[in-house]
Image (spheres, coloured by chain):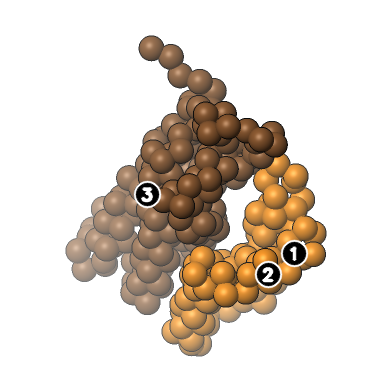
Chain colours: A brown, B orange
């Protein structure tokens, strides 16, 4: 049983930080949806807000870690150029070139990676905005339904971006694994 | 601080929300500009191993943080009269960002 450096970082990027972000999303949504003054005691509201702050900041940190590792550590391995005249077999070490070398797989780069590498960056930006707004407005969020609705919408967009990026990443890594 | 008898003005939170939309739209627009001009794309390659993605995201993040700082300074001591408008503008910016970063769309600007 062994794992290469590249496999280790790719797994950490997708299965720990990426998947962690997607899992904490459920906590953020439930926290925002159930945050209603009429449903809670003062003590209950305080505890819910504390949990919501922890969950939303966790989402932001996980998303930033995932995109930074993805962009600055894994992506250079993915897009590295093979030496001229490299055979099909040696292309195995150059996922982008391997995908582009066949018409059946080129779309994974031209559509999949091209979408993923940009869309993924929206997730941490929006998650940070949500975490900051929740923390700043913790004393009034309970009674501010328009702000809660907007934060829910941003959280949903952030989740959508991370989910698409994660899904495409999994498919691309299946078609041309980083080894 | 921004408090008055325990009340925290909501301008700071809406500044963060609108800035988030501006940051995403900035990245989307940079994606389209890089696709349209190879010269611009080359200028965005701040890191040779990452290519123009490094510049698109670095400058996009810079736009986001600058917009956030400016809006925060302007709104932190205010309760916004029409937060619905800020929400609507943010949604429009996010739609622009999504369309701009969608490969079949930015492919229309492809310059070889």
Question: Where residue A148 sits: x, y (%)?
Answer: 36, 69
Where does label 1 land, which residue? B38
Front position in the image: A86 or A9 = A86
Residue drawn at the location 67% of the way across and 46% of the way down:
B50
- Work out whether residue A95 or residue B69 is closer to the camera in this orientation and state it: A95
Contact check, label 3 and label 1, Cβ < 8 Å: no
In the image, residue A9 above or below residue B104: above
Q: Quadrant of the N terminus of chain A?
A: top left
Please give the chain letter of the residue carrying mark 1.
Answer: B
Q: For residue B34, which quarter of the picture?
A: bottom right
Give the answer, above or below, for where A164 lies relative to B99. Answer: above
Q: Which mark is residue A37?
A: none
The span from disc 3 to disc 1 (Cα, nearest Å) is: 30 Å
Discs 1 and 2 share one subunit: yes
Q: CA distance from mark 1 to mark 2?
A: 7 Å
Closer to the camera in the image, B78 or B13: B13
Chain letter for the residue marked with disc 3 in the picture: A
Q: Which mark is residue A167?
A: 3
Image quadrant where residue A93 sits: top right
Residue drawn at the location 46% of the way across and 38% of the way down: A176
The first of marks 1 and 2 along the sequence is: 1
Q: Could you tell me which secondary element the residue under label 2 belongs to?
A: loop
Q: Mark 1 Cα within 10 Å, few/some/many (few <14, many 20+)?
A: some
Q: Name the disc covering residue B111, or none.
A: 2
The answer to whether one can see residue B15 in this image is no
Vertical comparison of B3 with A146: above or below: above
Looking at the picture, how far across and down is residue B37, in whole percent?
73, 69
């Amino acid at each position: 049983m062994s794992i290469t450096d590249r496999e280790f970082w790719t797994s950490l990027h997708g299965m720990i930080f990426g998947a962690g972000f997607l899992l904490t999303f459920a906590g953020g949504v439930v926290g925002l949806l159930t945050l209603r003054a009429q449903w809670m005691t003062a003590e209950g509201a305080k505890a819910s807000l504390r949990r919501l702050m922890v969950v939303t900041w966790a989402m932001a940190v996980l998303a930033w870690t995932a995109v930074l590792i993805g962009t600055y550590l894994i992506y250079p391995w993915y897009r590295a150029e093979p030496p001229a005249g490299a055979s099909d077999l040696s292309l195995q070490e150059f996922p982008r070139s391997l995908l582009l070398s066949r018409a059946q797989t080129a779309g994974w780069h031209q559509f999949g990676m091209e979408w993923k590498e940009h869309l993924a960056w929206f997730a941490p930006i929006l998650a940070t905005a949500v975490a900051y707004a929740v923390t700043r407005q913790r004393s009034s969020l309970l009674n501010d339904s328009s702000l809660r609705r907007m934060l829910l919408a941003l959280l949903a967009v952030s989740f959508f971006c991370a989910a698409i990026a994660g899904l495409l990443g999994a498919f691309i890594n299946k078609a041309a694994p980083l080894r | 601080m921004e408090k008055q008898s325990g009340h925290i003005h909501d301008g700071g939170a809406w500044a963060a929300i609108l800035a988030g939309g501006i940051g995403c739209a900035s990245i989307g627009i940079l994606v389209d500009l890089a696709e349209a001009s190879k010269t611009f794309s080359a200028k965005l390659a701040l890191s040779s191993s990452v290519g123009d993605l490094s510049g698109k995201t670095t400058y996009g993040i810079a736009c986001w943080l600058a917009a956030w700082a400016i809006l925060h300074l302007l709104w932190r001591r205010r309760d916004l009269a029409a937060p619905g408008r800020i929400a609507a503008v943010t949604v429009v910016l996010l739609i622009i960002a999504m369309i701009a970063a969608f490969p079949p769309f930015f492919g229309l600007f492809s310059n070889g």
